[in-house]
Amino acid sequence: MATQAPARPGASSAAGAPAVRLTGIRRTYGEVVAIAGLDLDIADGEFFTLLGPSGSGKTTTLRVIAGFERPDAGHVELQGRDVTNVAPSERPVNTVFQDYALFPHMSVVENVEYGLRVKGIGRKERRERAEEVLARVRLPGLGARKPIQLSGGQRQRVALARAIVNRPPLLLLDEPLGALDLKLRQEMQVFLKELQRELGITFVYVTHDQEEALTMSDRLAVFNEGRIEQIGTPADVYEHPETEFVAGFVGVSNILERDGRRFIVRPEKILMTETGDGEAGVVKEVVYVGGFTRYIVDLDAGGELVVVRQNLESSSQDALEERGKRVRLSWRPEHTYDIGRDRA
């Protein structure tokens, strides 16, 4: 279990209060409603992700928590303290952005020290703390370099070091891995989760990448058009989507209507055979993706299903030869979930 980080000096904390509590938050830009009556609690020490497509309200919500945006209605509480009208610099949070926002003329260690210097921390202490946190983010000995001399992943870790050197109880991360290539992004996902566990502080993470959210989060909130469609653990949201939007956005879902029932079944839960019971159909398309193959099957009864098979022994040629075959698709009853249409 993550331990509670010490409160930032000057920040009051109510025992047992959530790290973040948003109540009735509304934020508009002219006629555009960015957030519509949002309620959200984030527990202390939690890795919580705000997930959704562009324009869904997730980044605006993060900016409201940070204080960069003032809500038109509602209240923001951090550690039990109402900070709705408190300036960003007076809130017990730090923020990490996608573009790193490092000072190019400063060395790495000077970048990390910057917040401590603004607070009037003495040179010796701030250098010790900066070197300590650089070691924590796996960058020992690189303090003398300039940001331009570092890789993208290293620059992102410098930005993290600068954000945590002040020991904030709450860290906000706005799509911090979006500029990295796939392999480095996956490595940084593991690193960030390990760092959060090590620090024991609350991370609030914004992303549009569903795999990233499922990989890293203790819980996540799925945003759509300024509201939250569903909150839960990654397994809950993936296995039991509450709306059609969630089913389609978080992973790939098959939605079928049979005998007046509307339900979903995930592609990896479907068994595809040449004979037997189940839905009959024809393999329309085959997509070989290395470790697995994706099949699109036209159903005799109407509609289509996506099926995923692991390539345990088959080759790409074996998979491609399935195109045009008649097949039967079946699944276990417990792997289907009834679903209503999206909320009005």
Image (spheres, grey):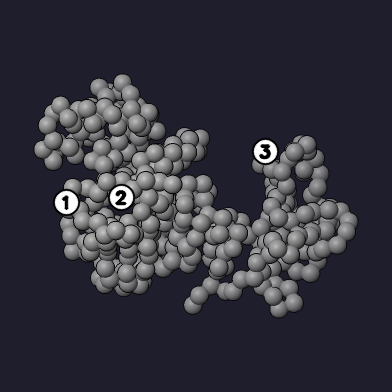
The tag earlier along the polypeptide, 2 or 3, is 2
In the image, is residue 229 above or below residue 211? below
Where residue 205 appears, x then y in whole percent?
39, 50
Q: Residue at x 28, y 29 (%)?
A: 132
The residue singled out by tag 2 in the image is 170
Crowding at label 3, few (<14), some or many (≥20) Cα neighbours within 10 Å? few
Would residue 227 be found to the left or right of residue 66 on screen?
Answer: right
The residue identified by callout 3 is: 290
Q: Nearer the viewer, mark 1 or mark 2?
A: 1
As drawn, is 139 to the left or to the right of 312?
left
Residue 233 makes an appearance in the image: yes
Q: What residue would you read off at disc 1?
A: 10
Distance in Å between CA atoms under marks 3 and 1 = 54 Å
Mark 2 burial class by Cα count in 10 Å: few <14, some 14-19, many 20+: many
The location of residue 111, given as percent across then percent down, is 23, 33
CA separation in Å, label 1 and label 2? 14 Å
Taking the spot 31% from the left edge, 46% from the top edge, the residue there is: 5
Residue 129 vertical placement versus 244 (above, below)? above
Residue 26 point in image, percent of width and height:
31, 70
> Is 215 displayed left or right of 69 in the figure?
right
Q: Quadrant of residue 124?
A: top left
Q: Quadrant of the rendered structure where residue 101 is? A: top left
Type of amino acid under label 1? Gly
- Taking 226 as reference, is 270 above or below it? above
How far apart in space, not on screen, are marks 2 and 3 (Cα)? Answer: 40 Å
State the image quarter where residue 227 is shown. bottom left
